[in-house]
Amino acid sequence: MAKNEQKMPLPKLDNLFTTQKERDEANLEKVCELPLTKLHDFPNHPFKVEDNDEMKEMAQSVKEHGILEPGLVRPLPNGEYQIIAGHRRKMASRLANKENMPCIIRELTDEQATIIMVDSNLQREHILPSERAFAYKMKLEAMKKQGFRTDLTSDQVGEKLTSVEKLSVNSPDSKSQIQRYIRLTELVKPLLDMVDNKVIAFSPAVELSYLTKEQQKWLLKSIECNVATPSLSQAQEMKRLSQSGKLDEDKIEEIMCREKPNQVEKLKLNFRDLQPKMPKGMPSTKYTEHIFKALDFYNRYLEKQKSMGAR
């Protein structure tokens, strides 16, 4: 062999017995029928999958027509699969008594899987504020881990893009709105539930997210006792006082007791006055329900006394 002649690598064994076309087809993604028992939810999946009326309709459709769009999964080391897109389809298939679900299997890193999972769900018509908040937070963290540069320059305006700006490019919300949504993840769960249920408006909720966890718990007590939620101006005042170290339980109660413009007059009950009269160990969240039950019992007692007096 000549001194400068390079040694050619040996062909792979598979290449000796397959055509190029067969090898190309083997690399294409295919739809596979996978057992539901081998499909596992995405860790900390931020989007709720509930057995409600909408899900029952979806299950009926699956029963009649099957899954029209396959789910997307990635393989796990144990031979099973993690769902990237298709959590609701999996539940609908289970409710329709199906054993398998059509899925596309794709090799993905943790960060790639997170980004695809969030993007596929953000297109849904109805998304709760808490779902959007945790989804944006997860995607932003995944983008940072994946190594998205934060000094990218826009060709159109020549300005540098931060991670949040990069996230907003293909999102339905602006950079500032995404930041406001992510702030909601700092709320304690009962307050966040109130945002989802439209008991607390979005803008006041963002301001309240700057309160410490202890201050938020004090606020929950005050909301229960005053049967009222904070307005935007009240939430902003609490935020300012919290950041200056001047917000305590009494100050929260004072702010919450102030009459708001056009406010319908409400009965105000002080938490400290109620607590000794409640069953020992009863959480404050149950006080309102207990009071109404006690009033119903008392009214039935009065009716009974009245009917006995009429005899």
Image: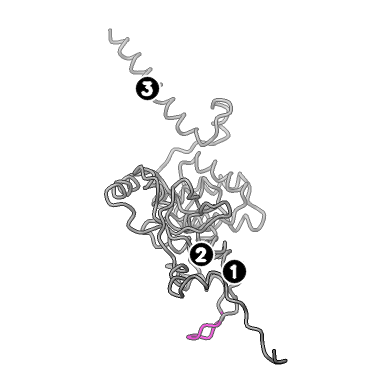
Asked whether the viewer can see residue 104, the reply is yes
- Specify the label residue 146 is tagged with: 1
- Residues marked 3 and 1 touching at CB (< 8 Å): no
x and y, in percent, of residue 256 in the image: 52, 47
- Residues marked 2 and 1 touching at CB (< 8 Å): yes
Residue 278 sits in which quadrant? top right
Residue 231 located left or right of residue 307? right
Residue 198 located left or right of residue 258? left
Q: Nearer the viewer, residue 265 or 66?
A: 66
Q: Identify the residue at image location x=50%, y=40%.
A: 224
Q: What residue type is labelled 3?
A: Asn
- Specify the label residue 115 is tagged with: 2
x and y, in percent, of residue 190 in the image: 51, 45
Residue indicated by mark 3 = 299
Query: Quick one: label 3 or label 1, which is nearer the N terminus?
Result: 1
Magenta segment range? 153-160
Q: Which amino acid does label 1 sit on?
A: Gln
